[in-house]
Amino acid sequence: MKETEAFVQGNTTTIIKRAAINVAGSGDNTIVTAVTGKKIRVLALSLTPAAAVTARFESAAGGTALTGAMELGAKVNLVLDYNPVGWFETADAALLNLELSGAISVDGLIVYAEV
């Protein structure tokens, strides 16, 4: 994780964080661990699967869907450009989960904030 930038909302300064994505398990895969009293807001994202797979982001493992099921093509990059208000966010104190339809390697990066 690398923390180099921040944004300000009211009187609160929030650090922007980055992390690598490297998962391959069928079903639940933790992308960002839960933080007590914080939501995980996804600001930007890049994913590349090694083979075709269906993926869905969730708030908590097996939890509430944050996206619909996305059909990702083999070695086709999915990019969510930087969005300062965020693409989606978890519930309070919930991890960010990537549910995969099969045991396919999915790699990439995530830019997020704990809000």
Image (cartoon, rainbow, N blue to C red):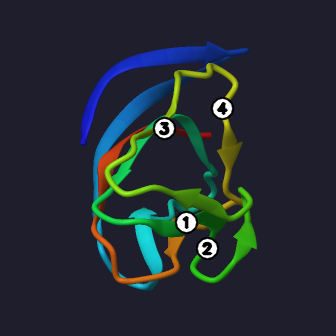
**SS class, disc 1:** strand
Going from N to C along the chain, the mark reached first, 4 or 2, is 2
Front label number (4 vs 1): 1
Count neighbours of disc 4 (C-alpha within 10 A) and say few if under 14, some if 14 to 19, many if 20 or more.
some
Mark yes or no: residue 106 visible: yes
**SS class, disc 2:** loop
- How far across and down, in percent of the image, does residue 84 sit? 62, 19
Going from N to C along the chain, the mark reached first, 1 or 3, is 1
The residue type indicated by label 1 comes to: Ala
Identified at 60% across, 14% down, the residue is: 8
> What residue would you read off at disc 4?
86
Compared to residue 94, the image places residue 9 above or below, namely above
Going from N to C along the chain, the mark reached first, 4 or 1, is 1
Q: Quadrant of residue 10?
A: top right
Q: Quadrant of residue 92?
A: bottom right
Q: CA distance from mark 1 to mark 3?
A: 19 Å
- How far across and down, in percent of the image, does residue 1 sit? 24, 43
Compared to residue 9, the image places residue 61 above or below, namely below
Which mark, by number, is residue 112?
A: 3
> What residue would you read off at disc 2?
60
Count neighbours of disc 3 (C-alpha within 10 A) and say few if under 14, some if 14 to 19, many if 20 or more.
many
- How far across and down, in percent of the image, does residue 107 sit? 28, 54
The residue type indicated by label 3 comes to: Tyr
> What residue would you read off at disc 1?
55
Going from N to C along the chain, the mark reached first, 4 or 3, is 4
- How far across and down, in percent of the image, does residue 97 sit? 53, 68
